[in-house]
Image (tube, rainbow, N blue to C red):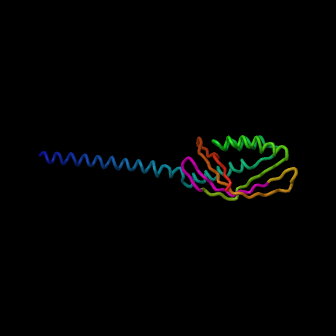
């Protein structure tokens, strides 16, 4: 074996090693960047987000005088972050006094919803709602239609409302 053959064999080995390492790095990048997140946003995950958004939104917008404390507590368990803080203050200062003083009962219903954005840890859902409200002063049901964008964050495996914005 001469020196040229030995050097050529080494370069072939080095080149082959570099190509194998580059292929492995590319496979890792594709897995982490595309495949793994896609598994967290597949149709089953999307349906889970839509279901969580619907249930939480109905809980936030539905309450009655006789079950108010339980209704508000249930709604709080479905929220996260700044929205949880805002809702706690708003419900204590505005919703609870109005419900108790005027006997307001509200019942929300999701008419339709659609996912507008989703990552493995956040999602936005466009929701079309009806909310029926009655009170002691107004026993005839008042129906209000609204559209909201619900932002959800995944916290400890659960999708929780992080924002609820009227459109």
Q: Is residue 41 above or below residue 89?
A: below
Q: Quadrant of residue 130?
A: bottom right
Residue that appears at 84% across and 47% down: 103
**Viewer-nearest residue: 167 or 21:** 167
Tell me, yes or no, whether the highlighted magenta stretch contains residue 97. Answer: no
- The x and y percentages for residue 98 are 81, 45
**Viewer-nearest residue: 109 or 92:** 92
**Viewer-nearest residue: 101 or 15:** 101
Pick out the residue farthest to the left. 2
Left or right of 148? Residue 40 is left
Pick out the residue farthest to the right. 137
Q: Quadrant of residue 141?
A: bottom right
Left or right of 166? Residue 24 is left
Residue that appears at 25% across and 46% down: 14
Number of numbered discs on residues: 0
- The x and y percentages for residue 49 are 61, 51
- Specify start and end residues of the magenta stretch as a single range: 116-132
């Amino acid at each position: 074996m001469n020196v040229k053959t030995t050097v050529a064999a080494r370069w072939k080995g080095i080149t082959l090693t570099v190509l194998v390492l580059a292929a492995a790095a590319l496979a890792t990048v594709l897995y982490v960047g595309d495949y793994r997140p896609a598994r967290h946003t597949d149709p089953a995950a999307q349906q889970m987000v839509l279901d969580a958004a619907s249930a939480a939104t109905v809980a936030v917008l539905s309450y009655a005088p006789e079950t108010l404390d339980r209704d508000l507590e249930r709604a709080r368990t479905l929220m996260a972050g700044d929205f949880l803080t805002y809702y706690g203050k708003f419900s204590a200062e505005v919703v609870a006094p109005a419900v108790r003083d005027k006997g307001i009962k509200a019942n929300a219903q999701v008419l339709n919803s659609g996912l507008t954005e989703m990552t493995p840890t956040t999602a936005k859902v466009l929701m079309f709602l009806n909310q029926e409200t009655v009170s002691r002063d107004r026993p005839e049901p008042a129906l209000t239609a609204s559209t909201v964008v619900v932002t959800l964050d995944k916290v400890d495996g659960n999708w929780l409302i992080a924002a609820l914005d009227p459109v």
